[in-house]
Image: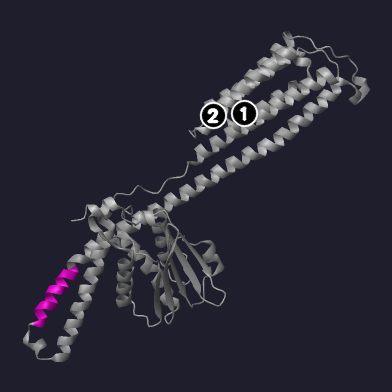
Amino acid sequence: MPLTAPGHPPAPRTASPAKAAGLKNLQQLIQLRWIAVFGQVLTIEVVHYGMRIAIPVEPMLTVLAGLAVFNVLSLLRWRTGRRVTSAELLVALLVDVAALTAQLYLAGGATNPFVFLYLLQVILGAVLLPGWATWTMVAVTTACFAALALWAQPLALPVDHHRGLASPYMLGMLVSFALNAALLVTFIARIAANLRERDGRLAALRQRAAEEEHIVRMGLLASGAAHELGTPLSTLAVILGDWQHLPHFSSEPELADDVAEMQAQVARCKAIVSGILLSAGEARGESSRATTLGAFLDEVVAHWRRRRPCEGFVFDNQFGDDLAMVADSAIQQMIGNVLDNAVEVSPAAVHLQAARAGDQLVLTVRDRGPGFAPPMLQQLGKPYQSSKGQPGRGLGLFLVVNVARTLGGHVSARNLEDGGAEVRITLPLSAIALLEEDTADEP
């Protein structure tokens, strides 16, 4: 069932779940790196000028300047919006490890209480990276720790651990622990939320793929049934045509009327079969025609009135200025399905309203029936969700929701406070309207 108007691009696709999660994770690393830069600047100032501990300030600030430049480049990379690979995240974390190693080398090596910040890098790698990259992080950080234990510039700290928090070393251990814990809680929670969002999007995509496959199977079934019914209907039409000319039928007015009624019903069945084949097998550009929105809606309403007479049916067109569009049988069937459901539960009162909301067409169907059961509202658009309690029912709204979604629109439903129900179909005009160059091609 092709549903894209000729000359119009399909509705834009949102970013894939994996791409969106990768970009968000890179953004988290950029934010964490800025915190690390400013935190290290503050720590250097406090240790050197506040606690009067001799450290090489200029080389350490140079390392931080390099880390800040790398973070600016990472920010520019993030703004491109391209997919972030696991290799890129690994490189980013390795740069952070290299900067931390350089700082620790200049300030005591493995004896520096902030050496445990390596664990933060390893845990981030375990959350963000595949197995091989995580073990790479473990190997690199272990090697860096061992190298710092062998080669590093000593840090002039007194061995006074017995003084508790009055000892600079114990105070540094406390700050290191608190910093690790706070950063882990904050950023691991954010990264986990990104991953859960990605998994949710993947689950929604899998559900949508299953529903679209279901629609394809239904289309194939309907098309096959229509082909099979075509031959016997044609045979019946020929036989009834021959009967009309037989003396026995022509001399009996009641029999002649019965034959004429049978011919009309067979013709209607053939028209239905032709409509099924048209929707299932022909492209939109081949089977559709240019019209206006007002004319199309009037035609849809007139066709539905002939098929389902309803004295209490009201059509209210509040769209405003008319608009050139493509007449599509799928849209006609979508509106017809909603009206059919409404008239079944409310034969005396069905209201259809067409309105414009910005660049969208809003079709609202209201009835005075018993309304939707709460489970149906929660599962709107799922197959075989029906209040009629009959096997095989409940596909009408399922098809409506999927047709609207294919066009870039959506369907909502609610129960009215004064009784009855409302189904609202919202379609982007760009999916059904004709541009000027489209109408210029018309003969």
The residue at the point 50 percent across, 37 percent down is 19
Residue 146 higher or lower than 391, as above or below: above
Q: Is residue 47 left or right of residue 80?
A: right
Position of residue 96 relative to residue 210, above or below, is above
| Region of the chain picked out in magenta, as a range | 232-244
Within 10 angstroms of label 2, few (less than 14), some, or many (20 or more) residues?
A: few
Task: Classify 10 Å Cα crowding around label 1: few (below 14), some (14-19), many (20 and above).
Answer: many
Query: Circle 1 is placed at which residue position?
Result: 125
> Residue 172 location, x and y as percent?
82, 23
Q: Determine the image quadrant of residue 258.
A: bottom left
Name the residue at the right extreme: 163
What amino acid is found at the position of numbered circle 2 in the picture? Leu
Q: Residue at horizontal 54%, vertical 42%? A: 198
Which one is earlier in the sequence, the residue at label 1 or at label 2?
Answer: 2
Instruction: In the rendered structure, find residue 76 and report the number of the disc placed on it.
Output: 2
Q: Main secondary structure of the magenta part?
A: helix
Of the 4 image quadrants, the one containing the C terminus is bottom left
In screen coordinates, is 106 left or right of 132?
right
Instruction: Say whether residue 242 is magenta.
Output: yes
**x and y percent of residue 185 in the render?**
71, 37
The three-letter amino acid code for the residue at tag 1 is Gly
Q: Nearer the viewer, residue 183 or 44?
A: 44
- Give the vertical position of 110 relative to 367 (above or below): above
Near-viewer residue (266 or 400): 400
Residues under labels 1 and 2: Cα distance? 22 Å
Magenta run includes residue 304 = no
Q: Is residue 74 left or right of residue 360?
A: right
Q: Is residue 352 left or right of residue 146?
A: left
Q: Position of residue 327 (x, y in %)?
A: 29, 61
